[in-house]
Image (cartoon, rainbow, N blue to C red):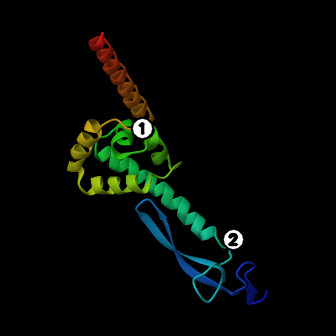
Amino acid sequence: MTDTRVHPETGKVLRRGVRSQTVSVGSMSRIVDVPGWYPDDDSDSIHSGGDLKTSDEAFRELRTAYATHVKAVRKRLKLTQEEAGRIIGGGRRAFQKYESGATPPSDAAVGLLEILNRHPEEVETLRSLRTSAPATGKSAIVRNRLGDSLRAKGARKSRSSASA
């Protein structure tokens, strides 16, 4: 095996080596050493499946650990999965997916989870914001347009009655 090779796209000379990389899931991270073919700068490197074994393992472990963390925070806040999905984000079934590790929470949901983990008293603030906020999304747009349309028809009727 040679000590160097040429990157097929950049044309840079690559050397076999190991570099530290950070693997993150939610608010958890781990630094792992990843072997591969690296240039002298921080540009593109090349890795085989075997090279990525350590980072893949770290990702799977972090995904499982973060799923457990999400469940623990939700239970500490005394929220059902459905309520947590509504006030933290993601929808009705989101926390089933987060807690099983099937889907990671969005960055916004991670931020709210970590704030609520440190300041659980703020769950009431978030709950009041979510329940008092005006309706959004497709159904709200349809309702608003329907309401506008009905008001416009009512105004036309009033004008035609007044002019008759």
Amino acid at circle 2 = Gly
Classify residue 71 as left or right of residue 6.
Answer: left
| Residue at the (39%, 51%) spot, across then down | 70
Residue 123 screen position, x and y as percent = 25, 46
Q: Is residue 39 above or below residue 59?
A: below
Residue 164 screen position, x and y as percent = 30, 9
User: Secondary structure beneath disc 2?
Assistant: loop
Q: What separation in Å lies between label 2 and label 1 (alpha carbons)?
A: 45 Å
| Residue at the (26%, 13%) spot, across then down | 162
Comparing 7 with 132, the one in front is 132
Check residue 137 in the rendering and tell me which mark sits there, or answer none: 1
Classify residue 14 as left or right of residue 85.
Answer: right
Classify residue 21 as left or right of residue 90.
Answer: right
* Mark 2 crowdedness (10 Å alpha carbons): few <14, some 14-19, many ≥20: few
**Circle 2 is placed at which residue position?**
50
Q: Is residue 2 above or below residue 25?
A: below
Comparing 105 with 118, the one in front is 105
